[in-house]
Image (cartoon, rainbow, N blue to C red):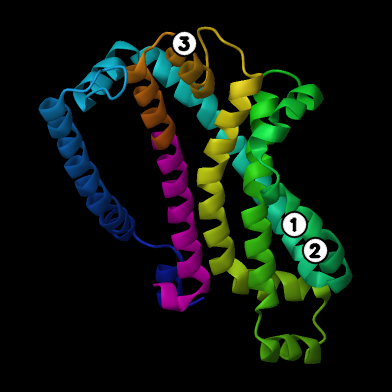
Amino acid sequence: MSRSDSKRAVPPVSSVVMRAAQAVVPSLTVVVVLLAAWQGAVSLFAPSEFLVPAPLAVVHAMIQSRHALLAAAWMTGSSAVLGFLMAAVIGVTLGSMLAASKFLMRGLYPIATLLQMVPLVAIAPLLVVWCGYGARTSIASAVIVSVFPVLAATLDGMRSTDLGLVELFAVNRASRLQRWWKLELPWAIPSIVTGLRIAAGLSVIGAIVGEFVGAFAGDQSPVGILIVSAIRENRTDLVFAAVSVAALVGFALFGVVSLVGWILLRRWHASAG
C-alpha cells in the first residue's frame, strides 16, 4: 500500500471532527429554532401543562430525574446496541447467502419480508413467552425490527455487483469465498451502510417496544417503563424528557454507525472521499 492509500484508508482526526461538525451543526441549529418556537407558542397560548409542557419544564424534569433518566438510557441503549449488532451480523450473513443462491432468495426472501409486514406490537407479547421478562425480550424485539433493512440492503448491494468484474474473478479462478470477500462485500458496502443507518434507529424503537411489555420496573427501569410510569402519574413533562433521552440514544447510535460507514466508504470507495 502506498503512502497516499494509507492516508486515505485511515482519515485524520481533523477530517473526522470536521465531518461530524458538518453533520451536527445544521441539525442543532434547526432543533434550537424549533425549541424556541415551541417555548414561544406555549407562552403565548398557555395550554395545559398536562397536554403540552414547555421546553423549560421538560428540561426541569430532566434535571430533577437525571439519575433515573441516565439509568434508563443505559438500559435501553444496551439493549438497542446488542440488538443492532446481532441484526447487523444476521442481516449481512443472510443477505450474502440469498445473493449466492437464487433458490434461497426466491424461497426465503418473501418469508423475511414478514418481519416488516407484521406489526411489532402484535408479536411483542409472544417474545415475553419465548424469551421471558427482562432485557432478552428487548434485545429480541430490537433484532426483529432492524434485521430486515440490513438483509435487504446487503442483498441489493451484492446483486448489483459489476458483471465484468464477476467474469474477471471467474477467469482467474477465484473461489466463491474470495469473490465474496474481495469483490461482492466491498461492492455492497454503500448499500450495507445505508441499511445499517436505518437499522440503528429502528433498534431503539424495537428495544422500547419490547420494554413496554417485558421490562421490570424499579430503580434501573429502562426508557419504556419510565414512559409508562410517567403517563400513569400524569407527568407529561417526564414523558417528554424520557422520549428526548430515547431520541438522544438513537441519534448517538446513528452517528456512530454513520462515522464507521464513512470510514469504510473512504477505504473501499474513492468517490466517497
The alpha-carbon separation of the residues under discs 2 and 3 comes to 47 Å
The reply, left or right, for residue 81 in relation to residue 40 is: right
Q: Nearer the viewer, mark 1 or mark 3?
A: 3
Any magenta on residue 52? no
- Dot 3: element: helix
Question: Label 3 sits on what residue type?
Answer: Arg
Query: Are circles 2 and 3 on residues that touch, CB within 8 Å?
Result: no
Residue name at image x 43 percent, y 54 percent: 259
Please name the residue that numbered disc 3 is placed on.
232
Identify the amino acid type marked 1: Thr
Reading the chain from its start, which is encountered first: label 1 or label 3? 1
Magenta region: 248-273
User: Residue 101 or 115: which is nearer the viewer?
Assistant: 115
The answer to whether residue 124 is above or below residue 5 is above
Do labels 2 and 1 touch, CB within 8 Å?
A: yes
Label 2 sits on a secondary structure element that is: helix
Q: Is residue 256 above or below residue 211?
A: below
Is residue 146 rendered to the left or right of residue 252?
A: right
Nearest the viewer among 42 and 246 is 42
- Residue 14 % position (x, y): 28, 57
**Residue at x 22% of width, y 27% of height:** 55
SS for callout 1: helix
Residue 267 magenta-highlighted: yes
